[in-house]
Image: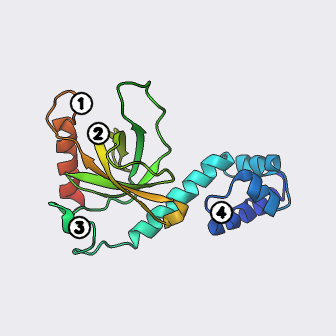
């Protein structure tokens, strides 16, 4: 390993701490080095590309900040909910728009889950999604091998600054009825089991 690779990774880390969304080009310019040097250093020290390293850092930072977050019982989101949501540390959501008239889009990057209930969930992302849009989602829990497949509609998209993520997206699940276009009862059973394990 080149002796300066560890130092370069530390400097990259410092830049991403201050600017979580900074591109490789911007970080390289600020450090007065090349994009190739940063990729080589991260590959050698961390075994990751710049993009993967940045994504992992943002997730870790979001999980830390969400761990310090405690939604008020009478907060603006809780006031309109039939069930109080709960938090699951290190859970993520991947999503894609749902539509019959277009080919299947690729799944999003892993997004940190904010909270969850039998009625819906919220997650952080960089994309604003229009209210009413239907999403197909994979909910991945840290201790579960298989993700939970869910379909829901966007209720809100509000600006946020948690770990550099631009938006918090609120989702209401479609009915759990084991019929075409909805959610399976198996997914509901999984959420109930998780709720029993994680709710206060």
Q: Residues within 10 Å of mark 4 (few under 14, many from 20)?
A: some
Q: CA distance from mark 4 to mark 2?
A: 33 Å
Q: Which residue is mark 2?
A: 151
Closer to the chain start, of discs 2 and 3, is: 3
Label 1: state its secondary structure: loop
The residue carrying mark 1 is: 181
Please state if 152 lies on the left or on the right of 52 as rendered: left
Residue tagged 3: 78
Which mark is first along the chain, 2 or 4? Answer: 4
Q: Are marks 2 and 1 in contact (CB under 8 Å)?
A: yes
Q: Earlier in the sequence, mark 4 or mark 3?
A: 4
Labels 3 and 1: the sequence-earlier one: 3
Q: Percent x, y for residue 75?
A: 27, 73
- Up-down relation of residue 188 to residue 45 (above or below): above
Q: Which mark is residue 16?
A: 4
Q: Nearer the viewer, mark 4 or mark 3?
A: 3
- Which quadrant of the figure has residue 29? bottom right
Mark 1 vs mark 4, CA separation in Å: 41 Å
Element under disc 4: helix
Left or right, residue 20 beside residue 170: right
Position of residue 65 measured from the top left corner of the image (x, y, whole percent):
45, 69
Asked whether the viewer can see residue 200, the reply is: no
Q: Where is residue 19 shown, x and y percent of the image?
A: 65, 65
Badge 3 marks a residue whose secondary structure is: helix
């Amino acid at each position: 390993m080149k002796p300066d690779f560890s130092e370069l990774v530390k400097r990259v880390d410092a830049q991403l701490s201050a600017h979580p969304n900074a591109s490789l080009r911007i970080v390289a310019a600020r450090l007065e080095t090349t994009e190739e040097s940063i990729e080589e250093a991260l590959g050698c020290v961390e075994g990751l590309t710049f993009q993967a390293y940045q994504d992992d850092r943002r997730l870790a930072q979001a999980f830390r900040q969400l761990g310090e977050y405690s939604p008020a019982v009478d907060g603006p989101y809780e006031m309109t909910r039939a069930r109080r949501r709960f938090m699951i540390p290190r859970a993520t959501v991947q999503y894609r728009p749902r539509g019959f008239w277009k080919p299947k889009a690729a799944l999003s990057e892993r997004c940190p889950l904010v909270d969850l209930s039998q009625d819906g969930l919220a997650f952080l992302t960089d994309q604003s999604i229009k209210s009413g849009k239907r999403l197909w989602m994979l909910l991945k829990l840290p201790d579960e091998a298989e993700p939970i497949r869910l379909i829901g509609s966007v209720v809100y998209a509000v600006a946020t600054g948690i770990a550099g993520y631009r938006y918090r997206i609120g989702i209401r699940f479609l009915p759990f009825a084991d019929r075409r276009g909805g959610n399976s009862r198996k997914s509901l059973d999984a959420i109930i089991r998780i709720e029993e394990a994680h709710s206060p």
